[in-house]
Image (cartoon, rainbow, N blue to C red):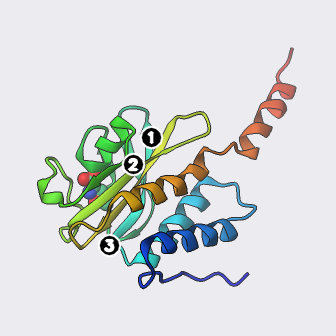
Amino acid sequence: MAEETLDLRDLPRAEAYERLGEYLDAVLEGIDDEVAEMSTMACLLHHAFGHLWTGFYRVVEPETLLRVGPYQGTLGCLEIAFGRGVCGTAAATRRTVVVEDVNEFPGHIACDGRSLSEIVVPVMDDAGRLIAVLDVDSERRGTFGDEDRDALERMVARFARPRASQRELVPSHAASTPA
Ligand code: SME
């Protein structure tokens, strides 16, 4: 298939997310690779809506530290501690955080001074462990609401599906272990 980035800014948001979800599923069909999935999701989401920054912060030390992952936009902060800023808050609470105006969020970390509103969604694996957060930033105030929360939570649910690669690791590793 000839892949291309979509521009969905002219569609009603619910319809835009539906189109984006279908497109993402088609582009990623047969791919079982977290980095490829995060990169593709960040790219499509970013360009579909013309966001300021779209990407993932990965959990590199459980309950302690997030480090930047695949993203689109200007240079992102490299590391964020759990509990700090919007990303750290979403990670620590495992809840989506929607910020209508970042100036009113105490401790907001401004990687790009143009950011005015944002949404951060926790990303879990199939065992329910937090593996990352998805952070989307906008230059406009009040960009994100319940529709975005629902759609993005559904979108990152793909990371919670069982992974063939992980399932296969168990028997092959077990087979090579001396009895
Ligand atoms: N605004 C985020 C920091 C990450 S960047 O903006 C890319 C926060 O407060 O967690």
| Relative side of 91 to 27, left or right | left
In the depicted structure, whether residue 6 falls above or below residue 53: below
Ligand 1, by image quadrant, is: bottom left
Residue 173 x/y as whole percent: 79, 30
Residue 29 x/y as whole percent: 72, 64
Crowding near pointer 2: few (<14 within 10 Å), some, many (20+)?
some
Q: Nearer the viewer, residue 136 or 95?
A: 95
In the image, what residue type sits under mark 3?
Answer: Leu
| Relative side of 105 to 49, left or right | left
In the depicted structure, whether residue 127 falls above or below residue 80: above
- Front tag of 3 and 2: 3
Disc 2 or 1, which lies upstream in sequence?
Answer: 1
Residue on which disc 2 sits:
67
Disc 3 or 1, which lies upstream in sequence?
Answer: 3
Q: Is residue 21 visible?
A: yes
Q: Nearer the viewer, residue 157 or 83?
A: 157
Label of residue 52 in the image? 3
Crowding near pointer 3: few (<14 within 10 Å), some, many (20+)?
many
**Residue found farthest to the top:** 179
Residue 94 x/y as whole percent: 39, 38
Residue on which disc 1 sits:
60
Crowding near pointer 1: few (<14 within 10 Å), some, many (20+)?
some
Task: Identify which residue is drawn at 42% across, 85% down.
Answer: 10
Q: Residues at badges 2 and 1 in contact (C-beta under 8 Å)?
A: yes
Task: Identify which residue is drawn at 69% across, 70% down.
Answer: 26
Disc 3 or 2, which lies upstream in sequence?
Answer: 3
Residue 23 x/y as whole percent: 62, 73
In the image, what residue type sits under mark 1?
Answer: Val
Task: Identify which residue is drawn at 83% across, 31% down.
Answer: 171
In the depicted structure, whether residue 77 falls above or below residue 127: below
Quadrant location of residue 174? top right
